[in-house]
Amino acid sequence: MDSASHPSMGEVVLMATSSAVTAILYAVYRHKSKVADNLKGAKKVTLDQDLKSLLMEAPGKCVPYAVIEGMVRSVKESLSSQFVDSCKGVVQRLTLQEHKMVWNRTTHFWNNYEKIIHQRTNTVPFDLVPLGSEGPPDVAVRVLKPLTATELSLETVYERFHPSVQSFTDVIGHYISGERPKGIKETEEMLTVGAALTGVGELVLDNSTIKLQPPKQGLRYYLSSLGFQTLLQRQESSVRFWKVLTTLCGLASCAILLFVLHKQYRRHREKRRMRQMLEDLSAGGDAASTCVVCLSNSRACVFLECGHVCSCRKCYEALPSPPHCPICRQLIARMVPLYNS
């Protein structure tokens, strides 16, 4: 009875796993919530002639976390697309990606597999200028370290898939090896000149140059083609998703805990009832310890769920199947041996 009074190893593992998953999901939710709160608290500034005066008055000529929207313009030479005529940009990413089918020996299915076999990124210095400006801008913001931004919005300007040519011998070899090539995908992505861009980062005035750079204190750096409100809504949507996931997992953990506690309560109550029956039996004397069936042997069986102690082991084994209690005629779910000390 003592070993049954503690949770089983499976129950302990289940409670520990559910609690650990809930804690991990809650940590992710808190991190996402902090990112969204920081983004919501960013100071929105306008790209105009008053921007330099604003930075001059700011402590350290710096706004630690600012939102600014403008249009991309290269400082000197811009990058030309390798595949599209008259397409200019300031960030260029060329990617070669291998596509093939791989045989899964566990599921016995062919699965798609993609692998980047070559990628090159080129950048040139660029500024953010007021939207719609055509001539030399009155004010510009130099964008530093664009490749470190969390959401660098690049537009796919060229994409082509080159299928692999296979002979009959190659096909047989691929089926034997478990790998079947499909082809190579060639992609060119660019941040084009003239594209609208929303930057969120540290805004500083360095001599006469205004710079947008990665923020400090663990804040995220954004360079996105989305508007600020859309970017904020996306982050808040992610926060809501992780909040719901954490809540559901937490409720599941609570349900498991309540189930285990209820099970332990029932075990404790049954143990207490058995102890009470043993005490009553000891107080009843020799007449109360005689089997009601054979009237000779001592009572040695406790019938559950009714709880009667009225039979010896030999008479219990002689009861017709399914066995019923000789006292109350209730079906005997199980029998617990009674040991008199």
Image: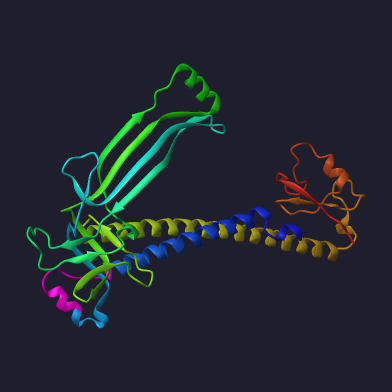
Which residue is drawn at the image coordinates 54% and 27% (left, top)? 177
Q: Quadrant of residue 339?
A: bottom right
Q: Tell me if residue 54 is in the magenta stretch.
A: yes
In percent of width and height, residue 251 lies at 48, 58
Point out the residue furthest to the right here: 296
Span highlighted in magenta in the image: 40-55
Identify which residue, 143 or 244, lies in the foreground.
Answer: 143
| Color style of the picture | rainbow
Q: How many marks?
A: 0
Vertical comparison of 173 with 275: above or below: above
> Is 16 left or right of 80, judged from the image as shown?
right
Identify which residue, 107 or 152, lies in the foreground.
Answer: 152
Point out the residue furthest to the front here: 77
Which residue is drawn at the image coordinates 12% and 63% (left, top)? 130
Q: Quadrant of residue 323?
A: top right
> Is 191 left or right of 327, judged from the image as shown?
left
Residue 259 in sight: no
Q: Quadrant of the C terminus?
A: bottom right
In percent of width and height, residue 286 lies at 90, 60
Q: Quadrant of residue 214?
A: bottom left
Point out the residue furthest to the top here: 168
In percent of width and height, residue 23 lies at 50, 62
Which residue is drawn at the image coordinates 73% and 51% (left, top)? 304
> Is 250 left or right of 324, judged from the image as shown?
left
Identify which residue, 123 or 339, lies in the foreground.
Answer: 123
Which residue is drawn at the image coordinates 63% and 55% (left, top)? 13
Vertical comparison of 317 with 30: above or below: above
Residue 20 in sight: yes
Identify which residue, 266 or 73, lies in the foreground.
Answer: 73
Q: Quadrant of the N terminus?
A: bottom right
Q: Tell me if residue 230 is in the magenta stretch.
A: no
